[in-house]
Image (cartoon, grey):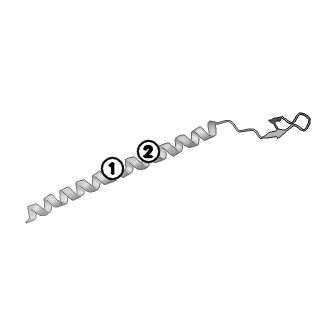
Amino acid sequence: MPPLVAIAGALGSAAVVRWAYRTVKRVNQELDAARQARVAETAAPEAKTLRRDPETGAYRPG
């Protein structure tokens, strides 16, 4: 019986290590995507507000 317990323990610990590795990898990918989005957001130029010109009726940057 003890060899069976050792084998079951080894398989269980291998499964836990595999699950932890995949979770860490997934979380790191999500964090990298969030960092990339923040960098892209700060690199984008500010959008200017358009104001209506009362004389011509055209919209121009204010």
* Residue at the outermost bottom position: 1
Q: Please identify the residue farthest to the left as the structure is shown.
A: 1
Q: Quadrant of residue 47?
A: top right
- Image x and y of residue 41, in percent: 61, 41
Q: Is residue 18 above or below residue 8?
A: above
Q: Quadrant of residue 43?
A: top right
According to the picture, the residue beneath numbered tag 1 turns out to be: 21
Q: Is residue 62 left or right of residue 43?
A: right
In this figure, which residue is indicated by the disc labeled 2?
A: 29
The three-letter amino acid code for the residue at tag 1 is Tyr
Distance from disc 2 to disc 1, alpha carbons, whole Å, reads: 12 Å
The quadrant the C terminus occupies is top right
> What is the crowding at mark 2: few (fewer than 14 residues within 10 Å), some, or many (at least 20)?
few
Going from N to C along the chain, the mark reached first, 2 or 1, is 1
For the view shown, which residue lies furthest in the right direction? Answer: 55
- Amino acid under label 2? Gln
Residue 50 location in percent, x, y?
Answer: 79, 39
Residue at 33 percent of width and 53 percent of height = 20
Q: Is residue 37 above or below residue 2?
A: above
Crowding at label 1, few (<14), some or many (≥20) Cα neighbours within 10 Å? few
Please name the residue shown 25% across and 55% down the image. Answer: 15
Q: Position of residue 44 (x, y in %)?
A: 64, 36
